[in-house]
Amino acid sequence: MLRRHLLLGFAGLAAMSAAAPVAAQETVKVGLIATLTGPQAASGRQKVAGAKLYMALNGNMVAGKKIELIIKDDTGVADITRRHAQELIVNDKVAAISGFSLTPLALAVAPVITQAKIPAIIMTAGTSIITERSPYFVRVSFTLPQQSVPIAEWIAKNGAKTAVSLVSDYGPGIDAQDAFKMRFEEKGGKVLEQLKAPLANPEFSAFLQRAKDLKPDALFLFVPAPTAGSLMKQVIDRGLIEANIKVVGTGDITDDDQLNGIGDSVLGLVTSHFYSAAHDSPMNKKFVEEFKKANPGMRPNFIGVGGYDGMHAFYQALEKTKGDTDGTKLVEAMKGMSFESPRGMLTIDPATRDVVQDVYIRKVEKKDGELYNIEFDVVKQVKDPIHK
Ligand code: VNL
């Protein structure tokens, strides 16, 4: 290099330094911490597929810089998530980290990102409190209260007077049951019992029997999406649907990734959620088509969309800062950001850094031989009802 400079002489040097930024092609690294092994592995598969698809369709150059995605598997263990976050920040010098399936995995990185002043884009985890744990969290997924309030309203409006809830016993489950109860009871209903099943053990039959014995009009369910298959099979086996109990939940229980495996017994089941693979928009049609092409045998779910939109938020932020990777500036750039996603319009609330979006009421139907959540009603631009 030096010799070439000398040989080129002054004119050559000037020409080279003008070309230097392109030639150097500074790389901006983004960490993606996904759960790719263990019981929640389906979530990591979706997230990585979504993030990679975004890059495949939008290129890897932003504000003159080359984006490099570094993918890590946390196996669903919070200590490993934290260690990956530290290594990505300290060794790889990433401009941002992203991912986080289960809530405890997101919470584990809060002190790390606060200290390092590096943004963390939450692509899945849905406990309300997470974004309050660090000013460097930005969420593009959802919160459970945001999704649970609309279905509480819908079921109250559709004649249910009593309900029982059954959720996984950790952050998002507690959020979901409490938000459901709050709105259902505001609407004149009564929650008879709030049942909680351990997250680690997908054995629901005793809880489902208890729910059945209480004879409520409705049963509200939440489990993390990768657990939906085992929950719903037990719901079917215990005969809750035939017992004339209206089974509802957040869309995690009829997740697009698992729904075909659950089978026709859940036809007609109503849930609320921010994304369905059947969402009717030109953007989503293209997204689903490209996702399927890039990932044979898979169709996107809300976690895939989270991966896709998380990358978009980062690209947009880096564009806005004109390539400046200062973490605080990147977070500032994401505050108030609004864009069209395969789910519909999404806004990052500038005050909470949390996602504001439409929540759809959907019903399981068969279309072209596959089960889908078909949207039939919508609550526009819902904010998390728990944040102050
Ligand atoms: C969470 C919430 C995880 C909803 C999920 O699947 C989900 C969480 C991995 O906050 O832990 O569907």
Image (cartoon, helix red, strand yellow):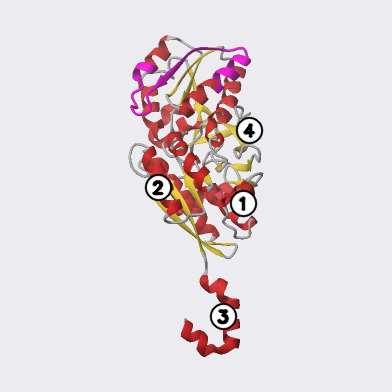
- Residue 302: image x %, image y %? 50, 40
Q: Tell me the element at label 1.
A: helix
Picture disc at residue 5: none
Judging by the rendered image, the residue that carries numbered circle 3 is 16
- Looking at numbered disc 2 in the image, what kind of residue is underneath it? His
Question: Does label 3 or label 1 sit earlier along the sequence?
Answer: 3
- Looking at numbered disc 3 in the image, what kind of residue is underneath it? Met
- Residue 291: image x %, image y %? 48, 51
How many C-alpha atoms fall within 10 Å of the one at disc 1: few (<14), some, or many (≥20)? some
- The answer to whether residue 301 is visible is no
- Looking at numbered disc 1 in the image, what kind of residue is underneath it? Lys
Q: Which residues are magenta?
A: 179-207
Q: Name the residue at 41% across, 36% down.
A: 258
**The stretch drawn in magenta includes residue 218:** no
Question: Does label 2 or label 4 sit earlier along the sequence?
Answer: 2
Judging by the rendered image, the residue that carries numbered circle 4 is 383
Asked if the beta carbon under badge 3 is closer than 8 A to the nearest atom of ligand 1, the reply is no
What is the C-alpha distance between the residues marked 1 and 2?
A: 23 Å
